[in-house]
Image (cartoon, rainbow, N blue to C red):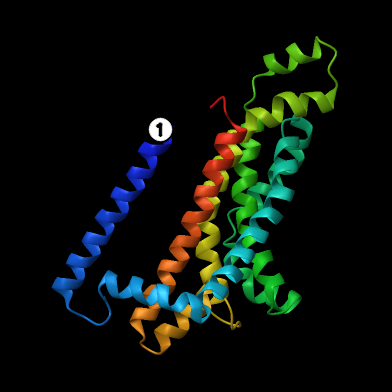
């Protein structure tokens, strides 16, 4: 497809420009804290077989499980807010809980669920949950009642309304919220993996930083960037398949 080909070339050009900017900065700064990109990418490829790939897989699983957990809770609640009675009940809780900086709850979550993967998944899922819920709720509340009345006139029940009107109308907004949430999930993942663990890219980056191993540090950052980019691209593919009308 011409559009897809154009997008791919756009990514290639953007990557090349970033590579050149990085190289020029490294040349002028001349500091071990900013190695050349060619050195970093060579180390990244070499370290894939030395455990980096395993750390990437562990981080990817944590991020994906967190997003799926958030989705499974946020989408049903957000869609139900199409009904004004339910929205009036949920809105006060949302207004009170959403502004709280949930990342500060990590010590409490660790106390309750331990230092394993569960606490990390719950923390990331909690933060992403509110982002998806707010977007889904707003989309559900803004659906024109004309479409609902049109379907009701054909004999549809409440299940049909949600299946054929509410969910399809909200789906593009849900996917947009998901794309935004990917960046948030990766950022919180780094924070959650930076202590009380021995696996994951966050752990790898902080360990390299403590050893002043800047090349490995940047290799970990590149791995985390590729993880976020891969999740973002996967969502683009899903959106093209599910939202053909957009």
Q: Tell me residue 60's x, y (percent).
A: 58, 64
Q: Tell me residue 124's x, y (percent).
A: 62, 62
Q: Residue at x 73, y 18 (%)?
A: 148
Above or below 232: residue 243: above
Above or below 206: residue 77: above
Q: Residue at x 33, y 50 (%)?
A: 12
* Residue farthest along the bottom direction in this orientation: 211
Q: Looking at the figure, which quarter contains the N terminus?
A: top left
* Residue farthest along the top direction in this orientation: 153
Residue that carries the numbered disc 1 in the rendered image: 3
Q: Tell me residue 6's x, y (percent).
A: 36, 37
Instruction: Give 235 or 105, whichever is nearer the viewer.
Output: 235
- Relative placement, left or right, of 95 versus 53 is right
Instruction: Give 148 or 42, whichever is nearer the viewer.
Output: 42
- Relative placement, left or right, of 33 versus 192 is left
- Relative placement, left or right, of 232 versus 155 is left
Q: Residue at x 76, y 30 (%)?
A: 83
Q: Secondary structure at mark 1?
A: helix
Q: Residue at x 36, y 48 (%)?
A: 11
Q: Tell me residue 72's x, y (percent).
A: 73, 49
Q: Are there few (<14), some (14-19), or many (20+) residues within 10 Å of tag 1?
A: few
Quarter of the figure with residue 134: top right
Instruction: Give 127 or 7, whichever is nearer the viewer.
Output: 7
Q: How many marks?
A: 1
């Amino acid at each position: 497809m011409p559009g897809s080909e154009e997008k791919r070339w756009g990514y290639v050009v953007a990557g090349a420009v970033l590579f050149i900017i990085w190289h020029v900065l490294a040349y002028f700064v001349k500091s071990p804290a900013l190695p050349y990109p060619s050195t970093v990418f060579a180390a990244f490829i070499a370290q894939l077989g030395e455990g980096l790939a395993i750390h990437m897989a562990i981080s990817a699983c944590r991020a994906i499980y967190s997003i799926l957990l958030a989705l499974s809770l946020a989408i049903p609640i957000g869609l139900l807010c199409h009904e004004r009675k339910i929205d009036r009940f949920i809105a006060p809780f949302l207004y009170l809980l959403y502004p709280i900086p949930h990342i500060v709850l990590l010590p409490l979550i660790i106390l309750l669920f331990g230092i394993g993967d569960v606490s990390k998944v719950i923390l990331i899922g909690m933060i992403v949950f509110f982002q998806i819920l707010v977007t889904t709720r707003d989309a559900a509340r803004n659906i024109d009642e004309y479409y609902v009345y049109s379907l009701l006139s054909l004999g549809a029940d409440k299940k049909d309304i949600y299946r054929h009107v509410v969910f399809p109308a909200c789906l593009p907004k849900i996917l947009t919220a998901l794309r935004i949430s990917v960046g948030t999930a990766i950022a919180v993942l780094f924070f959650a993996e930076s202590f009380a663990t021995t696996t994951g890219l966050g752990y790898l980056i902080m360990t390299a930083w403590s050893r002043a191993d800047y090349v490995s540090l940047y290799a970990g950052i590149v791995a985390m960037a590729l993880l976020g980019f891969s999740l973002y691209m996967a969502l683009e593919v899903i959106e093209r398949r599910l939202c053909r009308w957009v």
